[in-house]
Amino acid sequence: MTRIKKNIFAILLPMVVLFATSCSESLEEINVSPNSLPDTEIDIKFVLTGILSQSATITADLNMGAAEITATTQYLQRDFTSYDRFNFNWQAASYAGYYEPLKDSDYIFERADNEKTGKVKDYYQGVALIMKSYWYGMLTSIFGDLPYTNALQAEKGGDEFFKPAYDDQLTIFKGIINDLAHANTLLTGAGVIQEVADADIVYQGDALKWRKLANSLRLRYYMRLSEKGGIDINPAAEILALVGNSAEYPILVNNDDNAAIAFVGTNSDNSWYGGPLRSSNRSEFYRRKPSATIVDDLTALGDPRLTSWVRPVDVQIFQGATDEIVQEDGVLKRYTTADINAINNDENKENNIDTSLFVGLPVALTDPNQFQKFADGINANEVIASLDESVYLAAASNPHASYLTEMYAEDANPLVKAVLMNAAEVQFILAEASVRGWISNSALDYYNRGIQLSMGQYGISDGDPSAVYDKANNTLVPFDQGVYMARTQQIFNDAADKMEPIMHQKWISQWLTPESWFDWRRTGLPNLSVNIIAGTKGQEIPVRFYYDDPFNEENMLQAIDKLQPAENNQWSKMWLLQ
């Protein structure tokens, strides 16, 4: 709570002073410092805003700022500096930084119990349980066993709470699922809570939408447990029960339901990671390049999400009779006499040359700084600068590789949010449940709906001009939704294993979130390992963050003993994966 209290006091100080001077006739009362106010005099709705804004910041850092998760999902790669983590050379990580929204959720729950009544009380407690469940679900999925039962209670004193035992994952998941079910019950019939509408930056006090999130998270965690036998949780039966009673268990159904937090963009604390207020060094944006995996897949599909997320290269490469960079019809092109076909078919995958208009950085290169920088006697940057001064050529530049679109370099953009869960994910969960035979509804219908929701999340509409890259003709063409959906439906119908197209499209829809890493660990789909060129452990992808908890080392070592193998590294399997 310390940081939140300081932020709250900083916000409220002018208001408190103004109120005191205008309403009090006592100089003694005027001189009471607002910094001496007990935290109970600060409305808990401000703490709620803090939890949600913290969650947005942590989510952006986790999915854009850090390397580990985007390396495993193969959405991004990095060059210039610190790219070894994209080769899966990871370091130990502390989970402590993620516990602040957990602790503050507990704080809200307790304060609401003492200070609020009726549906207002139920609202605060329901939302607190949901956010606590979200973060515990994230953390146990990332690390494995964690302090849970006796965590967040250090004020009680003693090693039992100062150094809490690490609970096993099954205990944690049971607690999460029970809390989410309780939240759904608490929030039933609450309507819109007006007193907190301005503080709730996710759903503006709408209890029904929080219920939808609670039940959708239960779907997520039941599916995450789907490969674990011999436990007293039956994911198939639980998912059937949720889907079969939408009145009691509403779920996310459209993009208005998405648990997505927008960034304000007025200071470093409320801005998107890639914007100048959070990353004053512009090269930080350019260092994180879209990976070849996602770029090539979207190109092959003729998918308009490619142009929404990824920029064309500044200088496209062509086979030519001369070595030169020229400007043709206002576009820079590089011609090379190097035998591109021979280079791309030799045994060295690191020196391949990609001649597409959209070029992703291949996964886990030994030296990504040298990607596309073949030698043909041209001082490329000097020539490019002489032809077009607007092309970025400073630190982390690569004019022959794509960058993310400009919206990812802004402090705030309506299409760039911290996504905790979206409706598209729910549709793909249900498509998987259908393929598994757990529910009777059409897997194809869920699959199609998931794709359409993902398009809508990024404002993509049928007929959007220049939205699709036609690689065969090297041009941008309008998006024809009918053609695209017919193609993806054909892929589904032709697949011997229906899970493959479902998990492929789910992976695309979960762009810049961790969900596809968790899915890949569980199902092996999509087959991301085949894309790895020079990983730390061949073509293996890490399966967890590994612990850094020197203060609570004895309990941490006991948790490590339960890993397979019993080693604290990114390759050892947690219980969920054993």
Image (cartoon, helix red, strand yellow):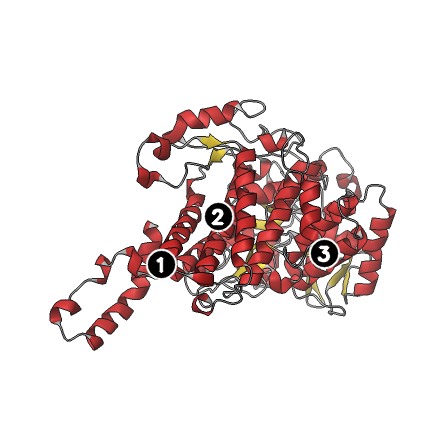
Mark 3: secondary structure: helix
Compared to 259, does 341 lie above or below?
Answer: above
Q: Is residue 470 above or below residue 507?
A: below
Amino acid type of the residue tagged 3 in the rendering: Gly
Residue type indicated by callout 2: Lys
The front one of 477 and 329 is 477
Mark earlier in primary sequence (1, 3): 1
User: Counting other residues with Cα less than 10 Å from the Cα at mark 2, is it few (<14), some (14-19), or many (20 or more)?
Assistant: many
Above or below, 256 against 233 in this view is below
Element under disc 1: helix
Q: Is residue 316 left or right of residue 491?
A: left
Secondary structure state at the residue bearing disc 2: helix
Classify residue 83 by image quadrant. Answer: top right
Q: CA distance from mark 3 to mark 2?
A: 27 Å
Kind of residue at disc 1:
Glu
Q: Which mark is residue 115?
A: 1
Using the rendered image of the protein, determine whether residue 398 is visible from the camera's viewpoint. Answer: no
